[in-house]
Image (tube, helix red, strand yellow):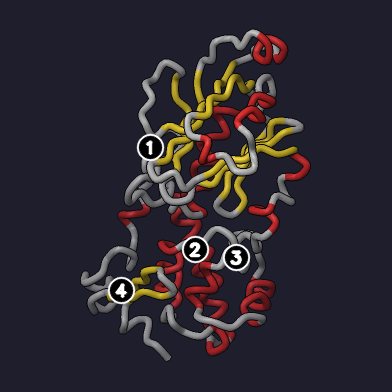
Amino acid sequence: MPELPEVETVVRTLGPLVIGRVLGRAEVLCPKILRQTPAAGLAELAGRRVRSVRRRGKMILIDCGDLGLVFHLKMTGQILVVPAEAPRDKHTHLVIGLHDGVPRRRVAGADAAAADELRFHDVRKFGFCRICPSGELASAPEIAALGPEPLEIGLEEFRARLSRRRGRIKSLLLDQAVIAGIGNIYTDEILFGAGIHPLTPVERIRRPRIEALFMEMRAVLERAIDAKGTSISDYVDAQGSPGGFQNLLRVYGREGEPCIRCGTAIRRIVIGGRSSSFCPKCQRQR
């Protein structure tokens, strides 16, 4: 599943391709991907100009004036901007035309030919899109329930949020209500860097180790963003380019391989239905 670095990379590559452009006709090829949005409702987007593209947690928010779009890529979703004449495949589920400098009344009425298209592509169809008034984006259920951003939260707030909870540290870092945007890949990498076993109860992690966890969280996410995310299966940015952080992974997906620090074989266990990779020596269970 695309996590914070991947979604941030999509936002950074998508913005220059769509901001300032006018949306055209929307084609819904798979109604299942629409959440609380009738297919006819997307017609209201025609003629509106894209004002901004931003990320919240693992979601992409596109501001189109008085209306906004929320996309969640889930497991295999992709948002791509391609020439309108480019062929589509069976996994393209939503298409929205993009126009350059076309008056709103012309696009909304006669539907001028689009120069490019914004396409939502999803092999497994778990991702979704919804439309809502821009003023209500922050209060949309998927957004309102999210915890703070890991690259914006301060150390004291981070420590306080963890101190109010009980449970295994791996599970808490994956909880989007605790901290938004971190998934399985980066939780494993963060815990390795901080030297914390994924099964460690959060109440047993002392203050210096919490600070190390906080610093490692920021460092790992920033490195992954710099590398344009991790491409293991389906993830690509808005231009179709893969990321490079898969070449820098230290524990995730390396079961049985030697630890880069001590040479011990990386182990994998399942916690709450999610796989977890770690070094049994560098991340001893205490």
Quadrant in which the C terminus appears: bottom left
According to the picture, the residue beneath numbered tag 4 turns out to be 268
* Distance in Å between CA atoms under marks 3 and 1: 28 Å
- Percent of width and height locating residue 226: 46, 50
According to the picture, the residue beneath numbered tag 3 turns out to be 179
* Distance in Å between CA atoms under marks 1 and 2: 23 Å
Q: Are marks 3 and 4 in contact (CB under 8 Å)?
A: no
Mark sitting earlier along the chain (3/4): 3
Q: Are marks 1 and 4 in contact (CB under 8 Å)?
A: no
Q: Are marks 4 and 2 in contact (CB under 8 Å)?
A: no
* Distance in Å between CA atoms under marks 4 and 2: 23 Å
How busy is the neighbourhood of tag 1: few (under 14 within 10 Å), some, or many (20 plus)? some
* Distance in Å between CA atoms under marks 3 and 4: 24 Å
Residue occupying image coordinates x 66% and y 37%: 131
According to the picture, the residue beneath numbered tag 1 turns out to be 241
Residue type beneath disc 4: Arg
Mark sitting earlier along the chain (3/1): 3
Q: Is residue 52 above or below residue 225?
A: above
Mark sitting earlier along the chain (1/2): 2
Q: Nearer the viewer, mark 1 or mark 4?
A: 4
Q: Secondary structure at mark 3?
A: loop
Q: Nearer the viewer, mark 3 or mark 2?
A: 3
Mark sitting earlier along the chain (1/4): 1
Q: Is residue 66 above or below residue 160?
A: above
Residue type beneath disc 3: Ile
Q: Nearer the viewer, mark 1 or mark 2?
A: 1
* Distance in Å between CA atoms under marks 3 and 2: 16 Å
